[in-house]
Image (cartoon, grey):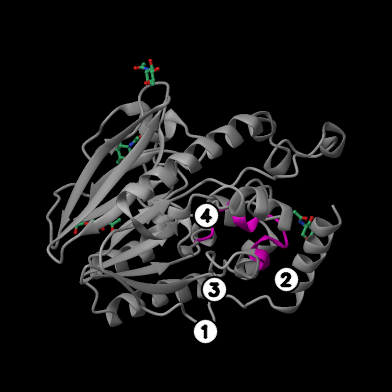
Amino acid sequence: MKASFLAATLAIVLATVDARPSGHSYTSRGHRQYKDGTIAIFGDYGWKGWTVPTAAECAGLPAVGNCDPADIGSYNDAVAAQERTAKFFGEVCQEHKCNEVMTTGDNFYNIGLENYKHFKESFIDMYTDKSLNIPWNPSLGNHDIVGNVSVSLELNAHKYDSRWYMPSRWYSHDITVKGVKYHFTVLDSSPFISSYRNNPASPYYTKELLTTMTPAMLQTQIDYLDKSSAESDADWKFLVMHHPILSTANNYTNPADMGGLFQVVQKHNLVVLNGHDHVLSHQQGNNTDFFTVGAGSLTAAGDGNNGVYLPYIKYTGSNATYADNGMALLSGTKEELTVQYYEYLQGVKKAAYTATVKHNAHYNITI
Ligand SMILES: *[C@@H]1O[C@H](CO)[C@@H](O)[C@H](O)[C@H]1NC(C)=O
Ligand SMILES: *[C@@H]1O[C@H](CO)[C@@H](O)[C@H](O)[C@H]1NC(C)=O
Ligand SMILES: *[C@@H]1O[C@H](CO)[C@@H](O)[C@H](O)[C@H]1NC(C)=O
Ligand SMILES: *[C@@H]1O[C@H](CO)[C@@H](O)[C@H](O)[C@H]1NC(C)=O
């Protein structure tokens, strides 16, 4: 008890004295090289340790955000899904030698990372398999920007567990596996979402959003993606962010919100990795591949269009009533990128779907 109190106090002190500013220069982990194995993509996971508000605490408050009755009611299911998926993740990574993990955000629910206890329960004591004792490279989701301490805690959480390393709200990094070089540009997508930005009643219209959402700040991220992608000589270049550009969830994201980013994606032939939709799915449009990996805890069949395929939906790990948990692993050659989904379906594990991406692929679906 004492230890966790001290740790929580330390967390606040660290956050206060050592918050790294948005989008500034940082100490990179450097270019990491591995002889073999894969790179894991994982998202929408950290429920355990959320301080669930009581009915009394929510009295008189709007039934959204931290007081959303659906979130409160699903806490136990969410934790159970997180725990079984964590175990499955460890088994998949043992078998396929994951070298690093890229997260697609919503690392911590419901108002982001609250304190050390939350980090310990949802990360340190959750992803314990030794195959997951590898570098984790997080991105921020909409839940991560709600609480006032969340972003600074995430930027500093490497002090609690050196696997975790978020050098900045947006950053880029390189990983080479088997001589194939992968370049990842990680962005903070929440400020792009107009339904947050233009709606003070949104639970995501937060202090953290207000510090990142002006048109000039959005342009800074767009320019950063452009420069980072242009300067890279990698075989495969990615945009990693929480929100989808092309979604299977009833077009939840407004394509216009992401227009500036998507121009840069098309210019540099980037592959897009995102979460937010609580499903595993693959979309194609405008000669671009979009991989949704948001199934680390609670899933939603509706986010996968209830399993109904449309011309731009190449795969969805869902049916009318159910969506699988799981993750994706990247591997491949200089000519062909392989994205393999692993799914955990009601106690049965399966390698569910494999996508192959080629350079300059032509998909005649226009979005
Ligand atoms: C964050 O701080 C602001 C004041 O700066 C306060 O109004 C708001 O309620 C705080 N948000 C949370 C989730 O604690
Ligand atoms: C999304 O929008 C596209 C283009 O308007 C449309 O063809 C498609 O059916 C929509 N998808 C869903 C899941 O509603
Ligand atoms: C997709 O490509 C078409 C044809 O080049 C273009 O007109 C359209 O603006 C692109 N869509 C987006 C969202 O960039
Ligand atoms: C969806 O998949 C789940 C899990 O396999 C299964 O229990 C359920 O019957 C399926 N529903 C439909 C409508 O196919």
Q: Are marks 4 and 1 in contact (CB under 8 Å)?
A: no
Residue type marked 2: Ala
Magenta range: 139-153
Q: Say whether residue 31 is visible.
A: yes
Task: Point out residue 20 in the picture as x, y percentages from the top left corner.
Answer: 63, 77
Which one is in front in this view, the residue at disc 4 or the one at disc 1? 1
Residue type marked 4: Ser
Residue type marked 1: Ser
Res. 25 mark: 1
Which is nearer the N-term, disc 2 or disc 4? Answer: 2
Res. 73 mark: none
Q: Are marks 3 and 1 in contact (CB under 8 Å)?
A: no
Which is nearer the N-term, disc 3 or disc 1? Answer: 1
Which is nearer the N-term, disc 4 or disc 1? Answer: 1
Rendered image quadrant of residue 348: top left
Q: Are marks 3 and 4 in contact (CB under 8 Å)?
A: no
